[in-house]
Amino acid sequence: MVQARGPGSEAGAGSGVACLVGFTTVMVFAVLLVLAMPRPTAVAQELETVRLSEVVRSVFYAPQYVALELGYFADEGLAIELSTAWGAHNGMAALISGSVDIGFFGPEATIYVYNQGAPDPAIGFAQLTQRDGSFFMARGRVENFDWNDVRGRLIVGARKGGVPQMVLEWVLRDKGIVPFQDVGIITHLAFEAAAGAFEGGLGDYVAQFEPAMTHMERAGVGTVVASLGAEAGDITYTVYHARKSFIESRPDLIERFTRAIYRGQLWVQEHSTEEIAAVVAPYFPGMDFDVLVTALERYRSIDAWTPTPVISRDGFARLQEVMMTAGELASSVPFDAVMTNEFAERVVAAGVSP
């Protein structure tokens, strides 16, 4: 049901899925195979295509891939055409231009567009992640890490103005380290190029998503020494958005889409990391199964995924605090101006079965 138009995996992904052979028992595979088969209802009905752009391809978004792979969107009469934008700014551009119907990215992009006075602004309607997805890696083998170790060093960061970079700066300040003064930060690299640049010898530290970090760690490039998500705490991090006009004209579609996402969220909560890995593996071709499990477990351990699609008002306020501290936002934007919980709250109240 999914037509993948973006790159299949992050730069620096693993080297093969042969390790599936050793996973638990044959019975588990049989159960998962049945779960992944298209449902008869999805085959019988004519599906409506929805063009979805994801900000990057990462196991950070596992509940989405579960919903896709287990046919939850098809159950709602939706055929998802998935593309990867490789950056919130690219995802927002695709959404505003009408190239896609739904954009999945950080709300910071929505705030920027709102403040620019867009005539048909993007509105967030369902949240998937509640922590920063970046982990912090030191080059080489490190036994005991202290944040003061980064002073005078060089960090391969993210795009200036994006949430991953702003959270990195927030954490550094919280540790008493002034970004760009006490430590150098590279911010000009494309997201998908950063891990490869670090692996090639650039910088002393890197902040990056999984599964690139587990891959580099196993290759002996460096040691994951911290989770920026754990350090920064809860924040409204990645949200599904649509143009205001689209939401007003197709509220039924938005609600069905939200229900499919919620089922994916519930399924992830109720299944083991190994079971999640087996379902989402098709979205990470060429990756060793044990790397995928390790990467997923890292996100699970920091409580990265929201239990429901309801967007957190407190997390949204925290996001704007981070943006203002980074100098990227002059004043806060009202939650209801750019976010809506109408559909998420209705879906959760009605209840669904994963």
Image (cartoon, rainbow, N blue to C red):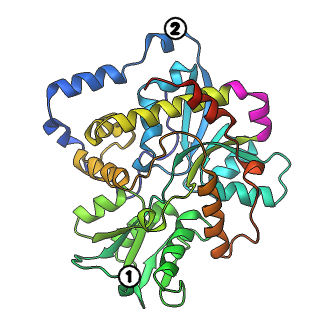
Residue 44: mark:
2
Give me the residue at 24% from left, 79% from top.
Answer: 144
Boundaries of the magenta span: 244-252
Q: Is residue 151 above or below residue 65?
A: below
Corner quadrant of residue 340: top right
Residue 335: numbered disc:
none
Task: Name the dominant secondary structure of the magenta segment.
Answer: helix
Identify the residue at image location x=58%, y=54%.
236
| Residue 55 vs residue 328, the one in the foreground | 328
Q: Describe residue 343's horizontal placement relative to residue 135 as left or right.
A: right
User: The residue under label 1 is which amino acid type?
Assistant: Trp
> Which image quarter: residue 13?
bottom left
- Report the front residue among 46 and 138: 138
Residue 48 is situated, as x and y percent measured from the top left of the image, at 62, 21
Q: Secondary structure at mark 2?
A: helix
Residue 307: image location, x then y, percent: 47, 41
Residue 94 percent location from the top left of the image: 68, 47
* Location of residue 248 with respect to 229 vertically, above or below: above
**Where is the C terminus found, in terms of image quarters?**
top left
Towards the viewer: 130 or 117: 130
| 116 in relation to 141, above or below | above
N-terminal label among 2 and 1? 2
- Name the front one of labels 2 and 1: 1
Residue 109 is left or right of residue 33, and the answer is right
Q: Which residue is mark 1?
A: 147
Helix, strand or loop at label 1? It is helix
The answer to whether residue 42 is above or below residue 276 is: above
Q: Residue at x 65, y 60 (%)?
A: 317
